[in-house]
Image (cartoon, grey):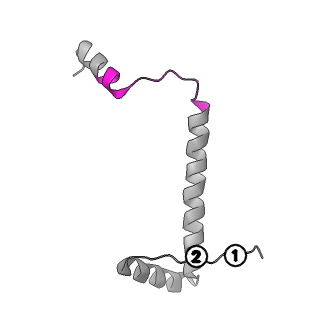
Amino acid sequence: MESSKRATVYFAADVHKALRLRAAASDRSVSDMVNDAVRVALAEDATDLEAFSSRDKEKSISFDAFVTGMKRRGRI
């Protein structure tokens, strides 16, 4: 079993109730559900970071310049 660390997390009352009900319905602990949700969020962050680094060499344009260009080309 991997080691665990304890943390105190405060949920809105309705979110906590929903978590407890979902945990009971799925025969899982709230901790397991929160751990899974955090892992999914971190995996999405890792995917985003990979995408950012793969586009690191692309030319960057500011929003203002982009909108000005659209107006100049008659797109807006």
In the picture, the disc for residue 25 is none
Q: Which is more foreground, mark 1 or mark 2?
A: 2
| Mark-to-mark CA distance, 1 and 2 | 10 Å
Q: Position of residue 23 (x, y in %)?
A: 52, 82
Residue 51, by quadrant, is top right
Which span is picked out in magenta?
A: 54-67
How many tags in the picture? 2
State left or right for residue 16 relative to residue 50: left
Does 57 appear above or below 27? above
Q: Is residue 12 magenta?
A: no
Which residue is labeled 1 in the image?
A: 4
- The residue at 42%/76% (across/down) is 11
Please indicate whether residue 21 sits to the left or right of residue 38 in the image.
left
The amino acid at mark 1 is Ser
Q: Residues within 10 Å of mark 2 (few under 14, many from 20)?
A: few
Left or right, 30 with reference to 13: right
Give SS at disc 1: loop
Residue 57: x and y in percent read 58, 24
Task: Point out the image quarter for the C terminus.
Answer: top left
In terms of image quadrants, where is residue 17? bottom left
The residue located at (61%, 48%) in the rendering is 46
Which residue is labeled 2 in the image? Answer: 7
Tell me if residue 25 comes above or below residue 63 in the rendering: below
Amino acid type, residue under disc 2 in the picture: Ala
Within the image, what quadrant is residue 5 found in?
bottom right
